[in-house]
């Protein structure tokens, strides 16, 4: 089993230990990694099955990255939207300036029963690759 380092995740409230509270721990871990790689969370919305966070970074070719997570049982689908500056009139209406990368996470693979982050290295690798792909697409 790779990278069993435990990230320090602050309590997100009392939970039963079920996947409904474990998904919040996974989103917080993703959020901490985004910030660790220089992306500042400027807007955060945590719901019961949907989470949405917007990040900015001044030295990036992207205007922002949006993280949109949807929880389906023990899985969480996360869309990372890389938004580039609008170049043309139609960008505003047709989202030509948005690139989406979807990643699916099995919650129990990343959050233990005692609500600790496991397989942190796999999460790190995913975030690094997603950021790189979005920024490369923005440079095209």
Image (tube, helix red, strand yellow):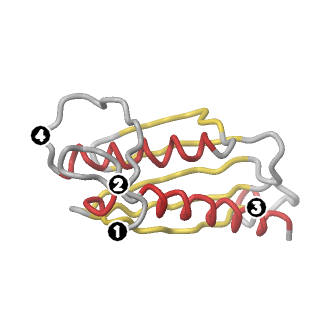
Of label 4 and label 3, which has the lower sequence position?
Answer: 4
Q: Is 109 left, or right, of 130 in this rendering? A: left
Quarter of the figure with the C terminus? bottom right
Judge depth for marks 2 and 1 and give the one in front.
1
Check disc 4 and report its element: helix, strand or loop: loop
Residue drawn at 30 percent across, 31 percent down: 12
Of label 1 and label 3, which has the lower sequence position?
Answer: 1
Q: Could you say which quadrant of the image residue 91 lies in?
A: bottom right
Outermost residue on the left side: it is: 16
**Dot 4 corresponds to which residue?**
16
Of label 2 and label 1, which has the lower sequence position?
Answer: 1
Label for residue 135?
A: 3
**Dot 1 corresponds to which residue?**
1
Q: Are marks 2 and 1 in contact (CB under 8 Å)?
A: yes
The residue closer to the viewer here, 99 or 89, is 99
Quarter of the figure with the N terminus? bottom left
**Mark 4 vs mark 1, CA separation in Å:** 26 Å
Check disc 2 and report its element: helix, strand or loop: loop
The residue closer to the viewer here, 28 or 114, is 114
**Dot 2 corresponds to which residue?**
118
């Amino acid at each position: 089993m790779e990278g069993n380092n435990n990230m320090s995740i602050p309590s997100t409230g009392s939970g039963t230990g079920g996947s409904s509270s474990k998904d919040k721990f996974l989103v917080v871990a993703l959020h901490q990694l985004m910030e660790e790689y220089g992306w500042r969370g400027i807007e955060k919305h945590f719901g019961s099955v949907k989470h949405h966070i917007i990040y900015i970074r001044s030295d990036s070719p992207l205007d922002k990255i949006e993280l949109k997570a949807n929880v389906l049982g023990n899985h969480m689908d996360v869309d990372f939207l890389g938004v580039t500056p609008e170049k043309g009139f139609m960008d505003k209406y047709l989202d030509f300036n948005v690139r989406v990368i979807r990643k699916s996470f099995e919650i129990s693979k990343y959050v233990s029963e005692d609500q600790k982050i496991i397989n942190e290295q796999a999460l790190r690798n995913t975030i690094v690759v997603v950021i790189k792909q979005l920024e490369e697409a923005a440079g095209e």
